[in-house]
Each structure stands twice: as structure tokens, then as C-alpha cells.
Amino acid sequence: MQKFYGKIPLEFAASLFYFHKKGIVQEMIHKLKYKGHEEIGETIGNWYAEELKNIEQIKSIDLIIPVPLHPKKLRERGYNQVTKFGKSLSDVLHIPFNEGVLVRTVYSKTQTRKTLLGRTDVIENIFDVVFSDVHHNKHFLLIDDVITTGSTLEACSRALLKIPGAKISIVSMAMAHN
């Protein structure tokens, strides 16, 4: 919550792990993201959902939405690294998972090698939303793999806040430990 305080209104925010360079969490997420080990996301999702299901703010969530990849990046990688994580959360928490509401409109290179300043320079209109009246006044759980500066999740949240009455919570597998 502190990462986003004063930037975007949130109902709830949490991460399961701290992410340290050269640590086991970095190794797991690297294998998930770049080596095709999607089962890691599924395992983390199942584990994390058990922790989340007793949290009051989670009980009011209407839809789980992953940070989307640009269609070109999705073709290059073959999968979104947070899809299995999100589907596992969805199964355990009994909350629908939807990859179609939030879309990435701008293709960008990986942020893993960018400096702090480069990461925070996320284009405001990099994400957009596709929604109808059914999405109005809903509580969305935005999910991602790692929170570093929070700029990607902030940009996603701003897009989701275009939906009338939208409320947002954020859950990630890990958060960079500074």
C-alpha cells in the first residue's frame, strides 16, 4: 500500500515474497517468465490464494485482471507469465479471471535492465480498458509478477479507473526489496 500511497486509490495491496537480486525468488520468477515454467505461477497462485481468502477486502473482489502483455510480446514469449497465477487465484478464491478488460496498447522492451528512472518513465497511455456497463462499480484485483517501482501497476490502475465506480486492489507474487 505504501508504494502507491498518494498515487492511486487502492482498497488493498500485497505481495507474497520479497524479490532480491540473485535470490531464490528471482530464480523462480526468471524460470516462470523466460524459461516456460508456467507451473511456478500456478503453484504460487494456489499457495497465495490460501493466504488471501481470509482477507476481508479480497471477499469483495468481482474480477481478477492480469497486467497484460502487448500482442507482439505475447507472440514472442508464447504466454503471459501471470496467467496461470491468476487462474489459480481464480479457482481457489472463486472469483472470475478476465484477460480482456485491460489491454496493452504500446509495445516496449523488458524493464528488467532499465534504471529506476527508466522504469518510472512509463507512458501514461500504455494501457487501455475495454469495458461495458457490466463492469461499472466493480472491484478489480490487478495482478502482476514483481512490483519494482510500481509504475506499471500505477499505469494499469489509471486505465481501470476510467471504468465508472471502479475500485482496485493489487496482488503480486513478489516485491523488490530496496
Image: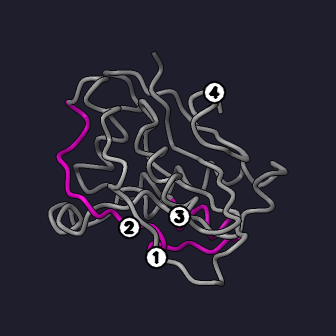
Badge 4, how many Cα within 10 Å: few under 14, some, many 20+?
few
Query: In the displayed structure, does residue 165 sit left or right of residue 6?
Result: right
State the residue position of label 2: 103
Residue drawn where x is 79% and y is 51% of the image: 57
Q: CA distance from mark 2 to mark 4?
A: 26 Å
Which residue is rendered at x = 59% and y = 68% of the image?
A: 163
* Quadrant (top left/top right/bottom left/bottom right) for the C terminus: top left
Nearer-N-terminus badge (3/4): 4
Q: Which residues are magenta?
A: 86-113
Q: Position of residue 12 (x, y in %)?
A: 71, 44
85 relative to 112, above or below: below
- Pinpoint residue 153: horizontal percent, then vertical percent: 47, 46
Quick one: SS at disc 2?
strand
Q: Which mark is residue 65?
A: 3
Label 3 to label 1, Cα distance in Å? Answer: 12 Å
Q: Foreground residue, 24 or 7?
A: 7
